[in-house]
Image: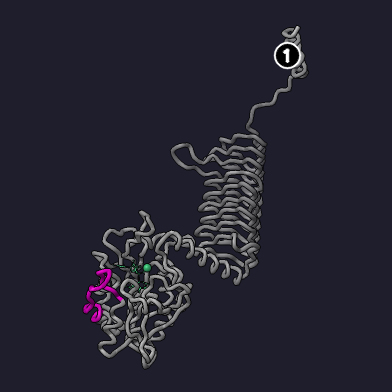
Amino acid sequence: MSDRKLAVVILAAGKGTRMKSDLPKVLHPVAGRPMLQHVQASVAELAPAETVVVVASDMAAVEAAAAPSRCAVQSQPLGTGHAVAAAQQALQPLMDAAAVDVLVVFGDTPLLTAATLNRMVEARARPEAAEIYGLAFRPADPAQYGRIILDDDGRIEKIVEFADADSAQRRIGLCNAGIVIADGQRLFELLGRLGSDNAQGEYYLTDIFALARQDGRPAGVVECPVEEMLGVNSRADLALVEAVMQDRLRRRAMAEGATLIDPATVWLSADTRLGRDVTIHPSVFIGPRVSIGDGVEIRSFSHLEGAEVGAGAVLGPFARLRPGAEIGENAHVGNFVEIKNAQLSAGAKANHPSYLGDASVGPGANIGAGTITCNYDGFAKHRTAIGEGAFIGSNTALVAPVDVGSGAVVGAGSTIVRDVPEDAIAVARAVQQNNEGQAARSRARTQAEKDRQKG
Ligand code: UD1
Ligand code: CA
């Protein structure tokens, strides 16, 4: 049994210039969640004793997104080795108290899985383990990645950055994923010996491998699937990573018992929760913070975010659920219905174009076509409460704050500005007048006028 502790350093201080963005690179979302938080989620599965995110000095937004992980500031972007060294101070108390393995990952590789990171941890836990392991992969096009040069024993002789590699080295297919696990004391000792005499004038994390070998204590290598190492350097990379992530999320949804009739057209978020026997029709968007109960049917072109949907409900086509929408069991939300910060209780129906905002609709109530909750008076939002079994006639404006009691009926075309008592019928519209024969008389007059002008 090893009583070694694990600490993780996530590098996120790079500017991400190629994104051409005001948003720091690691905050660009993938499946509705900042890239950095995908990496943090995989890291969290290892239950490390400490996680430190290395940020640049002008990155308050990254620090906020990184919470509750601690942050260390790299004052200048002098390279990946320099960035890891910036985390030393934060890790020192832990390293003084125990033997620590430090795992270094990049904040811009959101597809990295906990399974791969675990293989790095396990490599270090073996009795004959090397002090350091690097993570390798073999992409179809090795492009600009650093190349890993192995010795005859399969240990790492050195890692050569693309910019520093000669043409023979550039033909090597084994590439550096960038991720490293190492004994903490040893890692920081080697980092202290780095120089910056290379093509980019940077302190390369990768140079620790040649130093380790010079000391006669070479590092080992772990290989991982190519897909996990797709890093994001540009918007095109971001789209590629998004596509892989969506594919993963759809597969997971189907594995857990949802039917996606045309998976490629369903967009899911990293935190989407789907019950069993959910059916999602083609072309549906599910944004962040959505939870869908068992047996729910979501028809085409529905757009959901921040919503909770109870078992057996039917949504869409063209349903719009905005944050705070709570749809009860077996409720129906039809086409062009917009629901925001509102509860539609069990069995209630809003089947036709309507807006329900800041409202509660009781069980079994029926919302007629064209019902609008007028929730905003230009200054503040107000609530509408509709009781159990109430019936709201078509084209009703409910001017909030207003209550419609349970069992009440509101006549079509009403503008409701006062509360409606339980079981009452409320009608609030101009009284209809029928003027007998007036239409015929008016037509005759018009015709006579036309005839006179001609004649
Ligand atoms: C790095 C590796 C390369 C590997 C590739 C895999 C080094 C020297 N090179 O190259 O061998 O094939 O990743 O994708 O390690 N960062 C900082 N501070 C810095 C510089 C970088 O925090 O001063 C962070 C970045 O935010 C990023 C990560 O480190 O998250 C990697 O930096 P990047 O410049 O993208 O390295 P690569 O050139 O891709
Ligand atoms: Ca990179």
Overall secondary structure of the magenta stretch? loop
- Residue 62 in the image: state x and y as whole percent: 34, 61
Within the image, what quadrant is residue 79 found in? Answer: bottom left
Numbered-mark total = 1
The quadrant the C terminus occupies is top right
Q: Is residue 203 magenta?
A: yes
Secondary structure beneath label 1: helix
User: Is any atom of residue 183 visible in this view?
Assistant: yes
Label 1 near ligand 1 (CB < 8 Å): no
Q: Callout 1, which amino acid?
A: Thr
Residue lying at 73% horizontally and 22% vertically, measured from the top left: 434
The quadrant the N terminus occupies is bottom left
- Residue 435 in the image: state x and y as whole percent: 74, 19
Tell me which image quadrant ligand 1 sits in.
bottom left
Q: Which residues are magenta?
A: 188-205
Residue lying at 46% horizontally and 62% vertically, measured from the top left: 30
189 lies above or below 439: below
Report whether 25 appears left or right of 417. left
In front: 60, or 373?
Answer: 60
Within the image, what quadrant is residue 267 found in? Answer: bottom right
User: Is any atom of residue 97 visible in this view?
Assistant: no
In front: 73, or 15?
Answer: 15
Residue for badge 1: 446
Q: Is residue 365 magenta?
A: no
